[in-house]
Structure formats: structure tokens, C-alpha cells
Amino acid sequence: MKDTRDPNRLIFIQAVSTLLGIPKVNPMEQPVTSLGTGNTAVILRLEGGHWFQNRMRVIGIRERKTIRLVAKHPFKGPVVVEVEGREMTIGRRMAEHIIIMIPE
Amino acid sequence: MKKIVLMGNPNVGKSVVFSRLTGANVIASNYPGTTVDFSKGRMCLGKEGQEIIDAPGTYSLEPSNRAEEVALLMFEQADLIINVADATNLERNLYLTLQILERKKPVILALNMWDEARHTGISIDLKKLEFELQIPVVPTVALSGEGIHDLIRRIDEARSAEKIEPMNESDRWIKIGEIIRNVQKVTHRHHTLRDWISEASIRPLTGFPIALAVIFAALWLVSFIGETLIAYIFDPLFSFYTPIAMGISTWLGPGFLHDLLIGKLIDGQIDYIQSMGLLTTGIYVPFAMVLPYIIAFYSVLAVFEDSGYLPRLATLTDTLFHRFGMHGFGIIPVFLGLGCNVPGVLAARSLETKKQRFIAATLIAISVPCMAKNAMVFGILGSYGTGYIILVFATLFIVFVSSGLILNRFIKGDSPEICLEIPPYRKPDTLTVLKKTWMRIRWFLQEAIPFLFLGVLLINVLYAVGFVEWLGGIFAPVIQGWFGLPKEATTALLIGFLRKDLAVGMLLPLGMSPLQLVIATTLLTIYFPCVGTFAVMFRELGIRDMIKATAFMAGTAFVVGGAMRFVLLGI
């Protein structure tokens, strides 16, 4: 059997599920904010409006990229993430729209 | 004449390439959003002269703030595009490249920071990339000038890509994916000391102590450099000048011309701050009191900007600045405003919404004192004790915080979240720092000296025709009755519209107590911006918002002035 952690496979399963109208119930899907500081994961998908998704992609936050949580500021403050060696500061709500696959 | 426009993502070095191509100097720094307006320059290519335009950085051709709107406008006017891309981050940069190519404009691609890409283990096959994009690709290192000659030589080869047709966003990413797979190889990179410092300075636990230490060190450095320059260079220079000025004074004899050029003698001697003559105060204030601090502030700022620390500071202040209706990037206009409010207000362009820009501009105008004024406050209040200086800045800080809270509550509009790229730390280059500092000093001299002379001239004329007495009488109820200041202070507030530094100087002959001086200098920041700031606010905010901001300033000045009077002077 194929590795269940393969992001391509998950993205494929998701696409099929969406087509069939099956709700997403994968417990390994979490927003990037749930990562511990210094940990990495793979981005599964982006949520939110078209404009927001476009903005995230042009700054480098895209599906299938490995993302690392560099810092999470207190009081619902900003989140610093790293993708391909580049750090970016984004708002907490933005970060909650970045869905990753929790590594086991 | 052909219009060549430099376009690219924020912080890829467009302004550095621009300076290299035109020889014209523009401010470049290591943070996204340095260029908020376009600069024009010229370059000779063959027989023809070409106009080169440096546009603000943008991630795509769909603008998200005022600076990016400017970039789009420049793009539409362009005959040829030099697309500057960051070689260390090619994939993301190609999004804009493809969008530009889809619009069928002739393009040449400059792959900047080529050296950094090599060091970080990224190799890009230039031939293949040229083939994929169908445009010339030139590797450059703008900071050192490497590759710029090739770029100039090959500008003629710029062309539009025939085979790239307009596509939607996801197709564009698929195309980029294909290109990257074909042209780029990345060797795994290990974490370095630089990464470690970078992370320590952006994480809350370590970041805040580092920020405090850095800001404290910067303030100390500014005052140290400023004081040293005054004590060892500017004051000795003026001690040579004094006998000459005294000679002119005796030669002129008493009369209007003497009052205008030399001013009033105090105990038979020239007093550089109080005499108010063109050849005394008019020269001494800008050169011996303000210039040293301008030099100090801008050299320290340049190091800050080029190191890449500012976006990290913006991250740390984000939570706080949201309370003021902005996000962390708002700290950058505030920082620039500490040098001069004009570039500060301009830098607010990088904020996304009208609400954010209004609050940033108003807060700068109302509570961020510029270096010219600070220098005078150091010079004058400093002689009474550091405590008084702290009192002024503490009051302004309280005004900043409370105005921010109030404006956030009452100004309608959105305050979106921060979305800011953190550039890698870079060692500031000495020559670049010196050049940038020199540009800003020259700008100060060009802007400040005419207004200072005008101010001194106006003061003399106003005194001569009795306007000062008349005006003082009118405003006496507010100035004297409410703020507890002598009524002649009105003139200082009037002159403050021209030059705040000169206005602080005008307070000295009024024989005020140190606490009265504290009130007057604080009010000089709050009540109204100087003419330069007023003009740029008017342009950026429009007439309606400008009236709103002005009313808020007048109201705040009234409340704060009265409160300070009761707290500091008693009833």
C-alpha cells in the first residue's frame, strides 16, 4: 500500500471527495498554527477567498511546499513561517487558512 | 524617447539596478516597500537617450496597495520592461514574469542576487531559462555592479514571448512548475549562524529583549555621534566664524539691516540661538545644531535599513500596532518620520487600506518629532537636565498611543493583517551607507536652508511691523490663559509651520521656566505639521481627510496643552 502521508495522494483523495460531496474528515489536516515552533509540514491546501489564496501563492506559500513554523506571537499575534528558505510574517487569521498535513 | 521600466517583486534590488544603470542615486534598502513612488532617470543607449523608470515592487499585476498601483501604472506606460528577479527565489518571481510576458511587452530578465543564489546552493541553467521564456536572461549582482554591462549590452535583444498566451492563475503555476523543474537545481542547505540570529530576533521570547537592546543602542549611537560632531567639528568651526560675524556687526552699525543679518546682540555679543539674524541664527541652527544630528540619525538609520532588521521589528510590533488600527509595518513609516515627517508619511503608502494610511500619517504628524526639531530640543532643554527631555518624549509617546487607540475606534475602514516578507540579514556595505546618508543630508540642506532663511526673514519683518504683538494679543486667551505660556509664544507656533527647529529656538528669548519650555516644545510637535509634511499629507490623503486630521491635531493640542499645564505648572 502507498504511504498515506504522501501529499500528492492526499490531495488526490481530497479532490475526489470534493467531487463526490464527501466532507473532509481527515484528522491529520490542521492549520499551520497547530504546528509546534520549529516544526515542519507539507501544505495541503489554502482556504479563504481567491484574492487571499493568490497573495499567499505569490509570496511563496503554495500547495505541496514544505512549511516550517518559525515563531508564533502571543495574544493572537502574527505567525512567522519559512518556505524554501524564505521567512514570511503573516497574520494569525491568514495562517489559520493554511492547511497542512500533520506528520506522524 | 523609449520608456524602460524596472519591474519585479519587492526587495529584489530594482533600485540598486536603477542606480547602476542611470548613475542617479535613489534610496535602496533591505526591506520590501522601500520604493513607494517611481523615480525617473536617463541612460544613453547607442545614439538614442532612454528614459528609465524605477517602479515600486509588486508580486503580481493585481495591486494590493497604493505603491503597487503605481507599479501597475508604470507598467502600462512602458515600451520595454527590465524584469528584475531574485535568483534565490526564482519560482515565486516567475509569476510576475509570466504575467508581464502574457501582456506581450518586450522584456529582458535580470536575475539579481546571482552570487547569493550560488552560495545558497541554487543553480539555474540560463540557456534553458532563455529558451523557456523566449527572452534574454542576464545574471546580475547589482550591489557590486557585476552583470550590469551585460544587461545594458543586451537590452536591445529584449522581446516579447510569442508562445506565451494569457492564462489563468493555476495554469500559470503549472507552467512555472514545469520551467523550474527544467532549469533549477537546489542543493540542500544547512542552517547557518545567520539563520540562527534571524530566528532569535523574530521569536517573541528572544526577539523583544533584542529589539529593546538594539533600539537603545541606536538611540545612544545617534546622540553620541551628534554630540561628538558638535563638540569636535561644528562648535570649533563657529568659534572661527564669530569674530567675522562681530566684524560685520560693527561695520553695519545699528539699523534694520543689522537686525536682519546679525539680529539682536545679547550683552553686546552674538548669541547664535537668540539673535535671530540671517548670518547668525540662520546659519547656526541648521549647521551647528541640526545637521550633526541629521548626520547621526541617517547614518544609523541606513545601517538599520540595509541590515534587514526593520521587517523583524515590524513583526514584533504587529500585535501592538493592530490596537492603533495598523499592522506591524506601520513602525517603518514611524521610524522614517523620526528623521523627517515627509518621507514618513510617504512610506505609509505601503499600507493596504485608507484607514491604515490615514492613521499612520496622522500619528506621524501629531506625535513623531522630526530630527531637526529633536536636535533643538536636545540643545535647548538638555542644558536644564535630561529629565525635561524625557518629559517631552514621554508625553509624545502617550499622545501617540492614546491617539492611535482613539483613531482606531472612530475611523471607519479595514485594518487587514500583516503579510510581510523577511529578507535575509545582510552586512551593510560602508560605501552604500555613506552614499545614502549623504543623499539624505543633501536633501535636508536643500529643503531646510531656504525655509530657515525664509523663517528668519519673516520673524524680523513680523516684529518690525508689529504683527507679533497683534497676533499674541488675539491668541492670548489660549496660549496664556489655557497653556500657561507667554503670549509671544504664539509667534513660535506660527513660525513652526515653516521650520519646527527654528520655532524651538524662538522660545528661548521668552524667559520661560524649563517646565514651560517642555509644554511649548511638546505642543510644537502636536498642533500642526510643518509646511512640507502638510503638503505631502494633503497629496496622500486628499482634502477631506486632511481637514479631519487637522481638526484632530488642533483638538489634541488643546487637550494635551491644558492637561500638561495643570499637571506641570499647577493652576
Image (cartoon, coloured by chain):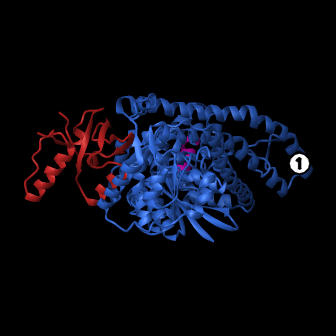
- Chain A painted colour: red
Left or right for B242, reference B457 = right
- Chain B painted colour: blue
What amino acid type is highlighted by mark number 1? Ile
Residue located 53% across and 56% down the image: B528
Magenta stretch bounds: B517-525
Q: Could you say which is closer to the camera, residue B371 or residue B20?
A: B20
Up/down of B256 relative to B265, above or below: below
Identify the subunit bearing mark 1.
B
Residue located 63% across and 55% down the image: B21
Up/down of B356 relative to B159, above or below: above
- The quarter of the rendered structure image containing the N terminus of chain B is bottom right
Residue located 46% across and 39% down the image: B424
Q: Is residue A9 visible?
A: yes
Q: Is residue B365 visible?
A: no
Q: Position of residue B142 (x, y in %)?
A: 58, 48
Left or right for A10, reference B2 = left
Q: Secondary structure at mark 1?
A: helix
Name the residue carrying label 1.
B248
Up/down of A20 relative to A71, above or below: below
Question: Is B522 within the magenta?
Answer: yes
Magenta region, main secondary structure: helix
Based on the displayed image, in which of its 4 quarters is residue B490 positioned? bottom right
Q: Position of residue B130 (x, y in %)?
A: 47, 56
Q: Position of residue B39 (x, y in %)?
A: 58, 60
